[in-house]
Amino acid sequence: MSIKVEVPTILRSLTDGAKAVEGEGTDLAGLFVDLDARYPGIRDRLVEDGALRRFVNVYLNDEDVRFLASLATPLTAGDVVTILPAVAGGAV
Amino acid sequence: MLVIRRDLIELILEHARKDHPDEACGVVVGPAGSDCPLRFVPMENAARSATFYEFDSAALLRLYREMDSRGEEPIVIYHSHTATPAYPSRTDISYASEPNAHYVLVTTREREPEADDAEVRSFRIRDGIVSEEQVRIV
């Protein structure tokens, strides 16, 4: 089963410049392991200590996965996963 | 160097003053690859904080979808500091994720009339390295 993954500019150095790639997995954690096999280093940019990195937003079919089950969010064929780095900062 | 129209700078400053004492944030987008900021898009600071800003995640996705469909990209990513100079903080640097964008900072802190620190400054932030650049207002 194939999941479409939309890749932000800052991670395209890991996907040979591709804006979108295909991956497989029954949940988001599995998808990132699958992607990392072909695009080494990408999982580390998304996952830290077994949780989604704070400054990365991941959407499943346009829904923020933090409002679903985060890395345990189940996936089905045809799903679209979008990765966007948070736009954030502050004075301290 | 950032080249930007005066009215866009005025809009950024107006937004920053309106949201003070919270930090204000947003983007000025333009055609991808043009390095030309054209369309002012103020964003809501989901953190509603005097010391932190974050684009709301749903609004962020809508913004990127809209830019994609129009062939645009964020040329300027701006935010305000409310009590400190317009210089990137450690947090700003660690979160910066658009190597091609101009990070514009403005400050709304009270300044002495003769203060020589600028109210509007622009930076590139790449791989954790900050480099200030000239701002040319046209």
Image: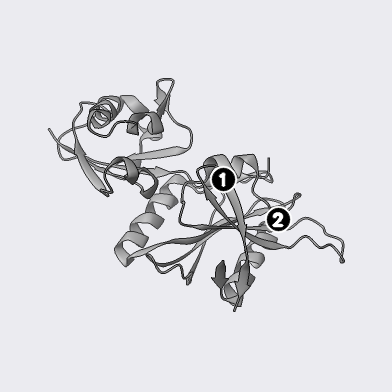
Is residue B47 in view from this perspective? no
**Mark 1: secondary structure:** strand
Q: Is B47 or B74 nearer to us in this picture? A: B74
Q: Is B93 on the left-hand or right-hand side of B19?
A: left
| Residue placed under numbered mark 2 in the picture | B20
Read off the residue under disc 1. Answer: B129
Quadrant holding the N terminus of chain A:
top left
In the image: residue B1, left or right of residue A8:
right
**Residue B50: x and y, percent?**
69, 46
Kindly give the residue lying farthest to the top in the view shown. A49
Q: Amino acid at mark 2?
A: His
Residue drawn at point x = 77 percent, y = 60 percent: B117
Q: In percent of the image, x 41 and y 24: which residue is there?
A: A51
Q: Residue at x 44, y 31 (%)?
A: A53
Closest to the observer, A76 or B8: B8
- Counting residues from the N terminus, which is met first, the one under dot 2 or under dot 1? 2
Tell me which amino acid carries mark 1.
Answer: Ile
What is the total number of numbered labels drawn onto the structure image?
2
Badge 2: few (under 14), some or many (20 or more) residues near its Cα, within 10 Å? some
Q: Is B111 placed left or right of A44 in the picture?
A: right
Percent position (x, y) of residue B1? 56, 66
Q: Give coordinates of residue B55: x percent, y percent.
A: 51, 49
Find residue B118 and name its label: none
Q: Quadrant of residue B5?
A: bottom right
Colour logic: one colour
Q: Say if mark 2 contacts mark 1, CB within 8 Å.
A: no
Label 2: which secondary element? loop
Chain identifier of the residue bearing label 2 in the image: B
Pointer 1 local density, CA inside 10 Å: few below 14, some 14–19, many at least 20: few
Would residue B65 be seen by someone viewing this image from the given angle?
A: yes
User: Is residue B55 positioned above or below A53 on the image?
Assistant: below
Q: Name the residue: 55% across, 39% down.
A: B94
